[in-house]
Amino acid sequence: MTRALVTMPATAKRGDVVEIRTLIAHPMETGYRPGEDGAVLPRNLIRRFTCHYDDVLVFSAELFPAVAANPFIAFSTVATASGTLRFSWTGDNGFTQTETVSLTVT
Amino acid sequence: MTRHLKRAALALLLVLLAPTMPAVAADTRRSGFDDMSSQIQAMQRDDAANPAMLWLQDGAATWQRDCASCHRDAAVSMRGVAARYPAFDDKLQRPVTLAQRITLHTKPLAVESEALLGIESFVAFQSRGMPIAPPADARLQPFRERGEQLFRRRMGQLDFSCAQCHDDHAGQRLGGSTIPQAHPTGYPQYRLEWQAMASLQRRLRSCMNGVRAEPFAYGAPEFVELELYLAQRAAGMRLEAPAVRP
Amino acid sequence: MKRRELLGAAIGLAGVVQWRPANATAEELAAAIAAFAGGVPVRNGRVEIDIAPLVENGNTVPITVRVQSAMSEADHVKAIAIFNESNPQRDVANFYLGPRAGRATVATRIRLATSQNLVAVAKMNDGSCWSQTVDVLVTLAACVEP
């Protein structure tokens, strides 16, 4: 069970800049590290993160092996209208995880 | 007021106040938290950024599914529990750690498994902010004393005891890092070195590796005794679980 | 691939062996920045990297990048890229913003194999590129497990 945590306010005033912090459990195996038997552990990374606000892409990121395990990404978005924010992580070995959060904008 | 007059006034004030000030020795104990950089301290303080929260979330789900039917609301039933472990187990007639207590009455959870660390974090979290409170149970005393002996015993190829680094040289630097006093204030914790959540026993095993000693097996009575002594040594200090450490 | 494996093993040993000439990585860094900037000259300024000057553990290093920008339709940051000088590869992370971001601030946690330079480059909607470079000291855990 992959765990993801999204922290953001549930409500905001129109025009406010909303801070969003995300955390997801993932080893982010670099593909450079030797395992206990000396053989290099295969690369296993989250490659891309996107945030859609009512299906409009408002933020995205490309991650490389230099991003630490259990990736933390913090960013912001302007509260435009009440709606749904959809956070999506995709990566190697068919990895995909989506979280949705509702934002009420007054 | 001139500087000299100020000093004289201060001295007089102290002399006058001296009899009213209680003669209390300052608590010089420091949690590993105090030895960390402000950036890592911020990571621990912020529940939205603390990686340990991922395990906590997992533990909360496990609680709902497997524990809540008997133990109800963890914030009530588990409050203060982690702060008084290790504790004496009547059936086994010996002390057990929190992790052992959990696995004694659940389905078998592998040592250091994600599932066990998750539920252990969740239970420990219910005591966050509370003082470490080792039970005043006389039956624990012989085990605690053995734990203290282990703490003072030289071991490994480097022939160091825990006390030599963590009592005698705490606060000094070893390589680039500050030697902590080694109080178990934040377990289970997310350790940056492992990029994973881990128990106190995993940390103790890695300490033993560090002095090139053969580590005791997980669950070994020596570890329970050491944990018992460490809890006594840290009695009264705030529990920070789940913590972050470098 | 053999070179990468060796470098990976060296890093895995918590020791640093600079067996590649220093110029090679500096050239790669310049090339990575130029590729991101699309050939546009990169100017120093407007970008601020917030990172501990002395890092206790290179496995997880918090970093925040802030770019001075109104983040309006007329003037906003389109992308922020972070590059390193001495890890096995130069890229760290790329972030894509726009006027809907509200603020040109991103934060994440990165891995640093050793003490090195880090560069953050911001690409603006008018095509201009700005950057800042910081030098980070990475200490190694003294009580190293074998």
Image (tube, coloured by chain):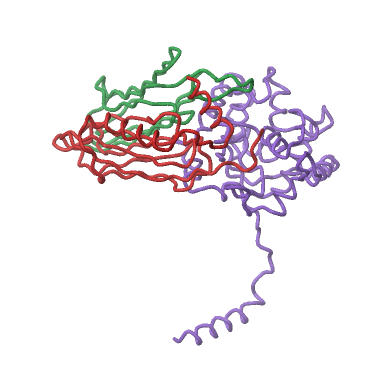
- Splitting the image into 4 quarters, where does residue A89 fall? top left
Tell me where residue C38 appears, x and y as whole percent: 22, 29
Which quadrant is the C terminus of chain A positioned in? top left
Chain seen in red: C
Q: In the image as oriented, which residue stretches furthest toward the left?
A: C74
Tell me where residue B183 appears, x and y as whole percent: 66, 46
Tell me: B230 left or right of B35: right
Identify which residue, B158 or B121, lies in the foreground: B158
Tell me where residue A55 appears, x and y as whole percent: 26, 19
Tell me where residue A56 appears, x and y as whole percent: 24, 22
Q: Residue at x 56, y 41 (%)?
A: C140
Tell me: A105 left or right of C58: left
B179 is higher (above) or lower (below) than C71: below
Identify which residue, C90 or B87, lies in the foreground: C90
* Shade of chain B as shown in the rendered figure: purple
Q: In the image as oriented, which residue stretches furthest toward the top?
A: A94
Tell me: B227 left or right of B74: right
Identify which residue, C126 or C9, lies in the foreground: C9
C128 is higher (above) or lower (below) than B233: above
Q: Residue at x 63, y 24 (%)?
A: B116
Would you say residue C58 is visible in this rendering? yes
B165 is higher (above) or lower (below) than C122: below
Would you say residue A9 is visible in this rendering? no
Q: How many marks?
A: 0
Chain seen in green: A
